[in-house]
Amino acid sequence: MIRLLHLADVHLGASMSSFGDAADARRRRLLEAFRELPEAARADDVHAVLVAGDLFDRPEPGAEEKAAVAETFARLIRDGRPVFVVPGNHDSATLHRHPYSEPLGGARVFLGPVFERQSTETAGGPLHVYGLSYDMAREDAPLDSYARADLPGFHVALLHGSAEFSPHWRIGRNALRLPLAALSALACDYVALGDYHGFRPPERFGGASGAPACYPGSFAALDLTETGPRGWVVVELEDGSLPRVRHRPSSVPPLQDLGTVDVGGAAHNEAVVDRVAERVDPGALPVARLVGVPDVAVDAELVSRRLAERFGFARIEDASTFHASARLDRIAEDDTVAGHVVRLGRRRIAQAPDQGAAAIAERALRVALHALGVT
Amino acid sequence: MTSTVRFLRVELGYGCHGAGTFEIPEKDAPVVIAGPNGSGKTTLVEALVRTLFGFDRRQPADRDCLAARVPWSGDRCRAEVEIRGGDGRRWRVRREFDDGHVRVVSLDDGSTWAGDGNPASANQEALEYRRRLAGIFGLAEIEHYESTACVAQGRLLDTRLREELLQIEAGGYGNVDEARARVAKAHEALTSRPIDGAGRGKTKPRRLESADSEIARLRSRLASADAVLGWRAPLEQEVDAARARVEELDLAIGRLEAALAPLNGRRALESKIQVLVERQGVVQASRNRVERASRQLAEIEDAVAVPLGERYPADFLERLGRLEWLWTRQAALRADRDRLNAAPREADIPPVWIAPAVAAVLAAIGAVAAVGMGSAMPAMVGAALAIVVGTALLLHRGKRARRREEALSRKQVVYGELDRIGEDLSREMDGIPRASTLSPATLDERRRAFEAQRRAAEKIDAARQALEEELLDAARTLDAAPPTDGTLQDLAALRAAQCAAAQEEIRTALARAHVEVENLAAVHLPDGVDATPEAVEAALAERRKERRAAEQRARAAETRLLQEGTGHESPVAIRDELVLLEAQRAAIEREVLVHEAAHALIRDAYQEFREHDRDRLLSAVSRSLVDLTGGRIGPIEAPGSLAEATVGVSGRQVELRSPPLSYGEFHAALFGIRLGASDFHARSGIRPPMIVDEPFAYLDLERARDLWRLLCAVARERQVFVVTQETLTLDALGVVPDIVLPALSGSALPAGTSPSGPAP
Ligand SMILES: [Mn+2]
């Protein structure tokens, strides 16, 4: 039995621009979390580490990122855990300059356009890693180059590419496409994948009849769509059975998708803040969609700011329907400009041709009332 | 909910009121300011109004008026009013009329605002002041005030319900302009495009435009990153092709270089064979020459072989010289002897020819015997016998002569000398073949024989010498040891044998060299290259040159690949960034649309609101009419234009004129219009004071009483100032003025108005 730590899509140096003011801190946090890998590898007593691409967010990462990677890999290797790396498409080796042109702490990097094999002896048995650096200009069908060596031990393919469900599947030849059939045809014990930022265990690659493949997902949420736990997987390989994969979260605070939060009847923004806050797990960053009919024109900016003060970051989408509130009913009765605004605004919401237009009309009513001093 | 604005106090340095202070009583009845004509009543209320609104220096009337308000004391024109605002707070507003500067102090919390209060100014300060003024007073423009609640002397009858009233937009409906400005400002932070789709946008890009240009930049970056892929493939192919050619050439060069050594080896072998062949020729020639010389020597030796006894000594010719003399002497002596012998008996002396004849016979016998026996021996024996017999015969004859001459001494001397000569002769004859037959007669023949013999010896010597030379030459050729003992012929045989051995050796070496050459023939050369070192060298040079070119091509292509064929950016990364940015842009655009919609919503709602202005004005006027008259008059209806509005009286609608309205009803209607319009214009619920200058002029007492009642009704709802000089009317109405201004007194304070309180 061999145990592998498989990670991908760390995107060190990513801008994290979706996190606004928290972006800088998050970028630093990501680097710190990456540095914790040797301890994590020790805790799970893995025999080797596989990095399936997009370790760096850019082909020319900063000195700090490169140094952190070199140091972290060197520590892993010093602990007797060899590190195998393939470049991704953010840090592709086909680019003019790329981070893999220099040694990274002794990691074994696959830079050829077709499969190469690197073998090593581990406490868990011999390990044969087959990797490649996708370069369509040199080889556009690199999967065909796989040839399983007739050697005892575990045979693992390491690839950065897009399976059919990955958003990069459609972007053409710049990304390596991995049809399920081709993955199954590789005939290896495990296919360590990177590129898709969600976690996809082998069970979701067709199970026993499919490919023993796995996407560990991104190491940490890089934008607001990447909710839920993020980190890496620990894989146990044993002859004749599907890989056993356990997901391990990185220490970068995850985004917690609270779904919809009903703020019906909330009389002020602080109440809205409380409604969201009471549902946030410790250490998580809330992402929520407000619904219901509050008695206040929710100021999503303000609510996000307040929540960010408490949790470090928050993303609030406001789909609450203040326009239907009793408070506006009262204002609508007045023969004032505000009354007319409410009445006309409500008509426009009702007449909106689609939901998007209705949402714009709803928010426009709120902005108009706010401008008129009705809060 | 309504709130009433009240003037509370005024302090003046204004016109005739050099340094006056007036306290204004708070009451729900009209504040009456009375005084004779020219006492400054109108100036006082004007000061109240102008302190708030100022003068518009662009208007000639305002300019003239302001010039006339310079205090008579010569001080600067200024005024300060205390006011309870429509917001319920107390304010003090002070104006410097020289420059229009105002100072607004909250008497509740002491907060102060100061700035330009000039009505003609459009700067931010002036706008702010007007905003504040609207908040305090309900109106910010003096025109709106003067067309409604502020009724100048004699202007009440001019009051009309006019469409113009509806066109006065200012302030009455909440902060619509401000609200729209606020929305527009937020919009402007988002985008530079105009918020209402009309007019020109800002030139400076805002968030939306920045996002747009960032997206455009990303797209072009993406396009070039993608394009790199297009350039890359052919460049890669070019590099591959060049590299493959270099490899091919390396292979060919390797083969050629490998072939070169064997080819050079063959060439060396061939020249070695050449050398061997040549040497073989040399040795063969040497051997031939030795053998020929040896054969020639043998032949010559055979040809000129002289039996030992036939060999002439080398000094044969010298000996012949000496023999000739001896013979001559002998003959002379013999003649002497014979003469001597002849004397006694010459006949007894055997003839002299006996001896040679006998010797010759013997020799001949020997020779015949020798021929017959095939051996030289009998010849030699014969010769010896001949010599011996001849000699013996001679000796015998000599003895006989000597004996004969014994007696004779002379005879003896002759004989003695003959003997010596004989001895000399025999000594000289010794070693000469067939000496017996040697005589002066055979001399020539003998000399020729000797010459022949000498020539033969010379020939042999020459042959011998030739052989020796050949042997020396052969020794040199063979590099053999110097001649050893043994005869020349032996040596010749030895050398010939050595030559043969050497030839054999060369033949072996040649055979070996040929085998080697045979082996070397197995070289692999590229097509079209001859198997010669020269051809190979030429092919090598050509291929090395081409290799250099191919290498250069590969390097150039690699450089281009690096420069043009590898992007600096990952298209996938750019695409990811683009997706994010487009989402952000969509959010910004959504906010832009929201603000545009909000802006339009306020505009449209306001317009909708304004579409009801007529109704609102009519209902405000109706309401004030009903309020003023206790329901006797009203409501106002205007199905057509406002000018044709009718008013309800006693259950029917009549024109707004007197008649059909009574004079009092008409006045009530005019006040109703004024106050309704004032309410209509004022910020919702704020009621500025009503000022009526000389309302009682030309009124009889009855009508004045009606009007007074009306004003008292108005004063329940708002502050009312009545300015009048009609003291008789006041007396008749039983009204005590609150402020009485004395007849024009220059700079004197109006009596009974200071410090405060109504006059008794
Ligand atoms: Mn990635």
Image (spheres, coloured by chain):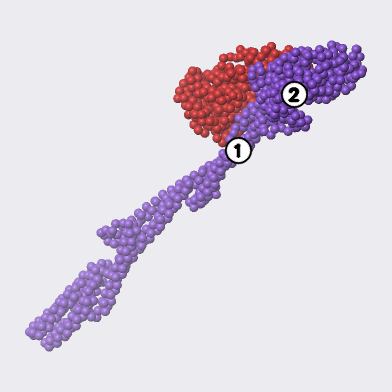
Residue B303 appears anywhere in the view: yes
Nearest the eye: A52 or B332:
A52
Give above or below for B526 relative to B487. above
Residue at x-position 60% and y-position 23%: A19
Residue at x-position 57% and y-position 34%: A94
**Where residue B252 sits: x, y (%)?**
52, 45
Disc 1 crowd, CA 10 A, few/some/many (<14, 14-19, 20+): many
- Tell which residue pokes out farthest to the bottom in this image: B343
Q: Earlier in the sequence, mark 2 or mark 1?
A: 1
In the shown orientation, is residue B284 left or right of residue B643? left
Q: Nearer the viewer, mark 2 or mark 1?
A: 2
Residue B10 appears anywhere in the view: no
| Mark 2 vs mark 1, CA separation in Å | 103 Å
Chain in red on the image: A
Q: Chain of mark 1?
A: B
Label number found at residue B232: 1
Chain in purple on the image: B
Q: Quadrant of residue B169?
A: top right
In the shown orientation, is residue A25 left or right of residue A369? left
Residue at x-position 49% and y-position 18%: A43
Nearest the eye: B151 or B77:
B77
- On the rendered image, what quadrant is the N terminus of chain B found in? top right
Circle 2 residue = B745
Q: Quadrant of residue B146?
A: top right
Disc 2 crowd, CA 10 A, few/some/many (<14, 14-19, 20+): some
In the shown orientation, is residue B162 left or right of residue A321? right
